[in-house]
Amino acid sequence: MSSQTTPEGQLSSSANNLPPQVTWAQRSSSSTADKNIIFLTIVAPDVSPSELKVDLKPSSITFTGHSETKKTTYHVELEFYAEIDPAESKTHHSPRDVAFVLRKKEMKDEYWPRLTKASQKLHFLKTDFDKWVDEDEQDAVNDDDAMANLGGMGGMGGMGGGDGGFGGIDFSKLGGGAGGMPDMGDLGGAGGDEDDEDMPDLEDEDTKEEADEEVGGSSKPKIEEV
């Protein structure tokens, strides 16, 4: 692939770089910040956290990730249609992709007309139809499931430089997913087995009561509850 650069600097790639598939959807609100967002997913499979760098700024995102199994380096730069708030944006890294929920900076009811500043069509940029709803129907949509599917997301604010961007994020420090979620595999010894060991043996308690009755000389039959 030959080197190419768009007038707006949206995509920069070379013979060693491949633009990943990028999908997006959006919500808008003039009153609720959590509903004034961009869903952005960069599909870059088999990229380990140590081989992943993201530079998220108010006006752009730069993504670079190397997959050793596919012998491919994914790279893309996108300049947003309008500014986002990096400090209030979230992300989650999975073996398949890196998903973002970007907070739009300007609160307004109208959708962005497109994701990027330039209007030219990018072959790797597609609508995420699993999340997309029309502007006049978004109030009827519950995005809790969509957010839950990004389990392990954490706020990425404070990880960048003083320019309000993230700088180069080192995902190797974030574990399998951003947000500092613990590895549930490490919690195996802290589950129900330990609690079971502390529970009294109910059968032994019954036996003890019967023995106490025999010692007390009581030969009265037990009253069975009806």
Image (spheres, helix red, strand yellow):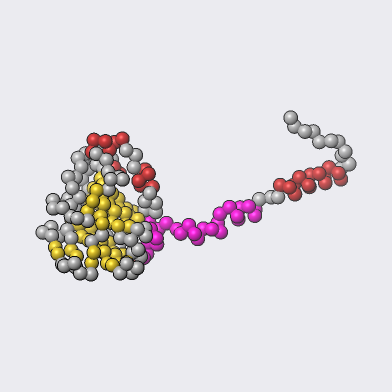
Which one is in front, 13 or 199?
13
Per the image, is 197 magenta?
yes
Q: Report the side of 11 relative to 215 (left or right).
A: left
Q: Residue furthest top?
A: 226
Per the image, is 164 magenta?
no
For residue 170, above or below residue 40: below
Rendered location of residue 226, percent (x, y): 74, 30
Which one is in front, 45 or 117?
45
Residue drawn at x 17%, y 58% is: 10
Residue drawn at x 35%, y 68% is: 69
Rendered location of residue 146, percent (x, y): 35, 46
> In the rendered structure, which segment of residues is drawn in magenta?
172-198
Residue drawn at x 27%, y 38% is: 138
For residue 213, above or below residue 125: above
Residue drawn at x 23%, y 64% is: 18
For residue 129, above or below residue 64: above
Which one is in front, 92 or 16?
16
| Quarter of the view holding residue 3 | bottom left
